[in-house]
């Protein structure tokens, strides 16, 4: 059994952060989204993992490496055009061979429940084992329609008029039967070879296709609010761990992680929160659901429900909330707003 992790895609809904960093490397609860995916795959006992990247020698390869850190062997497969998920399977054929595999979308965050989906695939070994989750906005996803006996009737990618609220989540188990399907289908209206269409093709041929409703947590971390939501979820699962320095004048709540080399001075830190390695946080109030990256400086500030990437400076800002702050960014308090703002940025200031 192999795994194929998709990590291409341009991440347009996460601009401007995704201009300079692949969205799969955005940190959630202190670790890149992609590492959470790799953890899930390793927990299934899979060690042979292919990662689809958009360009050779990408930042993803630098960040994730050979896989040794995860006890896995990683093969990078280049998909040089964003031509769809089924196209990625085509491109990965030399890596996949005729083995069974799980395809995992690298921007999907799951907690729990993966064992159940894998268990169904192992038990029944259908040509495709999918997973679905009830959502309020099914038109943004692949949608699955089931009959009264929970058999798959039809699949449709981003339907204008969804026939159910069951969205396909980004974890698909396949046998080698999928390769005929991805070779047979034509591009969709958005010009992509859709994996949803490939599975529909299998269904039309009478191949066994199963769907399980996912019971654990799931989000497609495609938009800033989803990234923050995933951060809240995964931070909430972290046990406290204090390795860095916390002075006697500071007060820490529960579920607080202070990484090696970090210093917390005269602060109040409510959990769940992470202070990343090498960061200095002084005279500040760090509120719940805040993940501060590595080598950041936070001084005389109040930060809640936010993610600061590495090397960020925040000084004299008393209400930073629901924010995603990119690498090396500087945020300073002032009596008036003075902004140097890049393209595609979204900023809200206190009125
Ligand atoms: C893709 C799939 C869609 C699935 C979704 C899950 O959508 O095409 O069927 O529901 O991932 O995250 P995309 O992220 O390419 O819009």
Image (tube, helix red, strand yellow):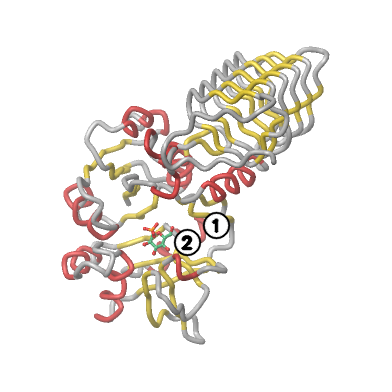
Q: Where is residue 289 shown, x and y percent of the image?
A: 67, 39
Specify the farthest residue to the front: 336
* Along the line of sight, the residue nearer the viewer: 300 or 216: 300
Which numbered dot is residue 284?
Answer: none
Position above or below: 44 against 193:
above
* Along the line of sight, the residue nearer the viewer: 59 or 341: 341
Which residue is drawn at the image coordinates 20% and 45% (left, top)?
80
* Along the line of sight, the residue nearer the viewer: 316 or 336: 336
> Looking at the image, in which quadrant does ligand 1 appear?
bottom left
Badge 1 marks a residue whose secondary structure is loop
In the figure, residue 293 lies in which quadrant?
Answer: top right
Q: Where is residue 212 shown, x and y percent of the image?
A: 49, 69
Q: Dot 2: within a 10 Å radius of its alpha carbon, few (fewer than 14), some, or many (20 or more) residues?
A: many
Position above or below: 100 against 51:
below
Q: Quadrant of the C terminus?
A: top right
Q: Where is residue 306 shown, x and y percent of the image?
A: 62, 37
In the figure, residue 322 lies in which quadrant?
Answer: top right
Which residue is drawn at the image coordinates 43% and 72% (left, top)?
143
* Along the line of sight, the residue nearer the viewer: 324 or 257: 324
Judge left or right: residue 112 versus residue 78.
right
Q: Which residue is tagged 1?
A: 113
Q: Which residue is tagged 2?
A: 117
Position above or below: 147 against 158:
below
Say if mark 1 contacts mark 2, CB within 8 Å. yes
Which residue is drawn at the image coordinates 22% and 47% (left, top)?
79
Distance Cα–Cα, label 1 vs label 2: 7 Å
Q: Dot 1: within a 10 Å radius of its alpha carbon, few (fewer than 14), some, or many (20 or more) residues?
A: some
């Amino acid at each position: 059994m192999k795994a194929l992790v998709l990590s291409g895609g341009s991440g347009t809904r996460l601009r401007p952060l995704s201009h300079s960093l692949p969205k799969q490397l955005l940190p959630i609860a202190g670790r890149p989204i992609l590492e959470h995916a790799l953890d899930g795959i390793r927990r299934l006992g899979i060690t042979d993992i292919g990662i689809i990247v958009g360009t050779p020698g990408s930042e993803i390869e630098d960040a994730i490496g050979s896989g040794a850190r995860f006890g896995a062997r990683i093969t990078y497969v280049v998909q040089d055009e964003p031509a769809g998920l089924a196209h990625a399977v085509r491109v990965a054929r030399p890596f996949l061979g005729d083995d069974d595999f799980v395809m995992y979308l690298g921007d999907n965050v799951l907690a729990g429940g993966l064992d159940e989906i894998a268990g169904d695939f192992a038990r029944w070994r259908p040509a495709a084992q999918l997973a679905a989750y009830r959502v309020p906005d099914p038109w943004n996803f692949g949608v699955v329609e089931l009959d009264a006996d929970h058999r798959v009737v039809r699949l449709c990618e981003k339907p204008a008029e969804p026939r159910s609220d069951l969205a396909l989540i980004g974890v698909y188990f396949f046998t080698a039967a999928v390769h005929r399907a991805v070779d047979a289908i034509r591009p969709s209206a958005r010009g992509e070879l859709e994996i949803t269409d490939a599975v529909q093709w299998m269904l039309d041929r009478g191949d066994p296709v199963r769907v399980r409703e996912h019971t654990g947590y799931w989000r497609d971390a495609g938009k800033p609010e989803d990234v923050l939501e995933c951060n809240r979820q995964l931070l909430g699962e972290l046990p406290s761990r204090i390795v860095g320095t916390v002075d006697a004048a500071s007060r820490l709540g529960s579920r607080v992680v202070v990484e090696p080399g970090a210093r917390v001075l005269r602060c109040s830190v409510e959990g769940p929160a992470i202070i990343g390695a090498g960061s200095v946080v002084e005279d500040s109030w760090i509120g719940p659901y805040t993940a501060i990256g590595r080598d950041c400086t936070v001084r005389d500030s109040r930060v809640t429900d936010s993610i600061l990437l590495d090397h960020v400076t925040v000084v004299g800002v008393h209400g930073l909330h629901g924010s995603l702050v990119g690498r090396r960014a500087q945020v300073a308090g002032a009596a008036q707003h003075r902004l140097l703002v890049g393209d595609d940025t979204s900023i809200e200031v206190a009125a």
